[in-house]
């Protein structure tokens, strides 16, 4: 157990990759702050499940990560409940698929706010405590789309390229403070986010569901398999370990070979 007595905040952890991170950190002994949207009863079930399964404490923050004021409250909740915020994972994200000329401006603003700017704000509030304790791990869920583009995903690709740059900048600023900052760039991971974009992609490209799955999603992924949320979470746990203390400013793909092409 490498995170005993530490606290991890994971944004967007009521589902998908974020929930897998929260459970993986709890398995390593961390108290966790989970965040995101969903039905209250489902969220409570996941929160209580983390406590029951791993014997740690888990609290939930409903902060809307597109709102900087609520982000400050999220970090404060971690510090006030557990005393420290040691691991920060910026993971909340949404997708929208449309040609640029039809892309709704409010969707552009939402995706930039959530998938990019929220990480600036969480770091801004969490870094002083990490610096004071001379230890921290900041992990940003980027994407293969932080390295390459796909059509019809202008806001997402822009935000993900942006978070890769933010990661490098923060890593350089914090290099002598015992704080590492990295991003994990998954290819297609089977989660609600991927499932939800299938109808829009069918519409934008005039394809069937099977064609979207095989010819669009896994077309780029040479292994022809989806990444699992547990695989992504295991990499995050490694990045929290002492063995990873010299990995900082990195953008680590986990994409079945997608960005090797
Ligand atoms: P998901 O839809 O399962 O989870 C997204 C989470 O973000 C949920 O908990 C949701 O409630 C939360 N969220 C949405 N809007 C929010 C807001 N305004 N404030 C706070 N929380 C909010 O998606 P996922 O696939 O697990 O994606 C997680 C991250 O991984 C995203 O950043 C995504 O871009 C990235 N990613 C996913 C894949 C993939 O294939 N699934 C690939 C690469 C990168």
Image: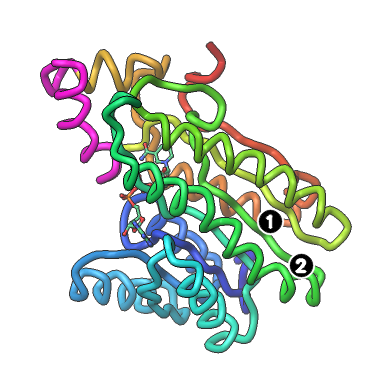
Magenta highlight: main SS: helix
User: For this view, does 15 lie left or right of residue 165?
Assistant: left
| 250 relative to 112 in the view: left or right | right
Q: Which residues are magenta?
A: 191-211
Q: Is 192 located above or below residue 59 in the figure?
A: above
Relative to 102, is 170 above or below? below
Residue at 55% across, 72% down: 30
Q: Is residue 260 magenta?
A: no
SS class, disc 1 = loop
Residue 255 x/y as whole percent: 47, 28
Indicate the position of residue 250 as horizontal and vertical percent values: 69, 38
- Depth order, front residue of 67/54: 67
Identify the image's colour scheme: rainbow, by chain, secondary structure or one colour.
rainbow
Residue at (51% x, 46% y) in the render: 141
Q: Which mark is residue 241?
A: 1
Q: Which residue is mark 2?
A: 135
Membership of 202 in magenta stretch: yes
């Amino acid at each position: 157990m490498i995170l005993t007595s530490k606290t991890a905040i994971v944004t967007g952890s009521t589902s998908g990759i974020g929930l897998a991170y929260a459970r993986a950190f709890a398995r390593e002994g961390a108290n966790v702050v989970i965040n995101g949207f969903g039905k209250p009863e489902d969220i409570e079930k996941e929160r209580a499940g983390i406590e029951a399964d791993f014997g740690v404490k888990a609290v939930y923050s409903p902060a809307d990560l597109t709102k900087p004021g609520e982000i400050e409250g999220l970090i404060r909740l971690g510090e006030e409940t557990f005393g420290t915020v040691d691991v920060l994972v910026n993971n909340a994200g949404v997708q929208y698929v449309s040609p640029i000329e039809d892309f709704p401006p409010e969707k552009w603003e939402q995706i930039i706010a959530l998938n990019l700017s929220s990480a600036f704000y969480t770091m801004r509030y969490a870094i002083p405590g990490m610096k004071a304790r001379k230890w921290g791990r900041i992990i940003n869920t980027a994407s293969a789309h932080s390295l390459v583009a796909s059509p019809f995903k202008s806001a997402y690709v822009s935000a993900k390229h942006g978070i890769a740059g933010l990661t490098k900048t923060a890593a350089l600023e914090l290099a002598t403070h015992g704080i590492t900052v990295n991003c994990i760039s998954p290819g297609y991971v089977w989660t609600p986010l991927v499932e939800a974009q299938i109808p829009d992609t069918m519409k934008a490209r005039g394809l069937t569901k099977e064609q979207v799955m095989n010819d669009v999603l896994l077309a780029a992924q040479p292994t022809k398999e989806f990444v699992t949320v547990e695989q992504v979470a295991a990499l995050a746990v490694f990045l929290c370990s002492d063995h990873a203390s010299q990995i900082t400013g990195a953008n680590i793909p986990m994409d079945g070979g997608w960005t090797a092409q």
